[in-house]
Image (cartoon, helix red, strand yellow):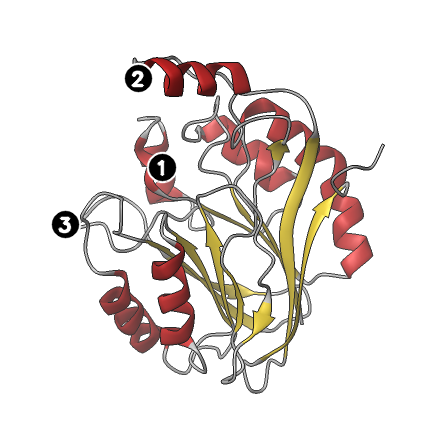
Amino acid sequence: MKLLFIGDVIGKPGRQVLGDRLRRLQRKYEVDFTVVNAENSAGGRGITPAIVDETLALGVDVITSGNHIWAQASIEQTLVEEARVLRPDNYPGSPPGSGLYLGLTRNGDAVAIVNLQGRVFMPPIDCPFAAMDRILEEIGANTKLIFLDMHAEATSEKLSMGWYCDGRATAVMGTHTHVPTADARILPGGTAYCTDVGMTGPYDSVIGTRPDLAIERLLTARPVRFQVASGGLAVAGVVVEADPATGQATAIESFVDPPFGSA
């Protein structure tokens, strides 16, 4: 089976380019299941129920998120009612929603999608490694196809999760930093890995923000209200091919569509 995973959708420009290109990417890669991280799709911060409906209607099977999932208060009821929208599972207490989705691909293979959040340079929530152990036990014999969105700031933490899951998950795909990394590979135990799959939205920007505003904040050290940029629209992500019988990845390919520098 083939899973298409698309990185952080940034505001209206990100939603626009996702809508323009998703179907073509699904056909190009002949994918069986599509996951999109959309935690920044509402004006660059959070997601709303209306955007959830819009995104799922494009042909997305599961929406993952991260630390900005709580930015729009209206999303909390959707997290309770819509199993296809995930929040990081390792938030403490009993927040609305879940970080685990169990379902079927288009060709009938059982699949698990997991969403976790890192703690290095981020809020000190519950341990993602302990959470992954618990989730793997919960998944049990339901499926061997297990795909993790590891939403984290530090490359070291994402890499550590990749090695921690090697041979126990099909793929560990990093999100949050919005810059695609060139390390998509299969680890020795058969787990596909990429430190950051990149963002979907305006690349003529500073991780999605208008460059002038990001520079102003750095030059002045004063608060600046960021605005989503609009130029250089592209979709970034990875395609993972896996064997349903073993759960091992057989290939991973990262992409930016259109490629950087193309007309």
Q: Nearer the viewer, residue 3 or 205?
A: 205
> Eyeballing the image, is 47 above or below 174?
above
Instruction: Name the mark on residue 111.
Output: none
Q: Which of 114 and 158 is in front in this view?
A: 158
Which quadrant of the figure has residue 142?
bottom left
SS for dot 1: helix
SS for dot 2: loop
Q: Distance between the residues labelled 2 and 1?
A: 26 Å
Residue 152 visible here: yes
Q: Residues within 10 Å of mark 2 (few under 14, many from 20)?
A: few
Q: Distance between the residues labelled 1 and 3?
A: 16 Å
Label 2–label 3 contact, CB within 8 A: no
2 or 1: tag closer to the N-terminus:
1
Mark 2, residue position: 221
Mark 1, residue position: 69
- Image coordinates for residue 70, horizontal then vertical, percent: 31, 33
Q: Distance between the residues labelled 2 and 3?
A: 35 Å
Mark 2 vs mark 1, foreground winner is 2
- Image coordinates for residue 140, horizontal then vertical, percent: 36, 80
- Image coordinates for residue 57, horizontal then vertical, percent: 63, 38
Q: What residue type is labelled 2?
A: Ala
For image coordinates 31% across by 47% down, the residue present is 97
Q: Quadrant of the C terminus?
A: top right
Q: What residue type is labelled 3?
A: Gly
The residue furthest right is 263
Residue 210 visible here: no
1 or 3: tag closer to the N-terminus:
1
Q: Residues within 10 Å of mark 1 (few under 14, many from 20)?
A: many
Mark 3, residue position: 93
> Eyeballing the image, is 53 above or below 256?
above
The residue furthest front is 219
Q: Nearer the viewer, residue 242 or 226?
A: 226
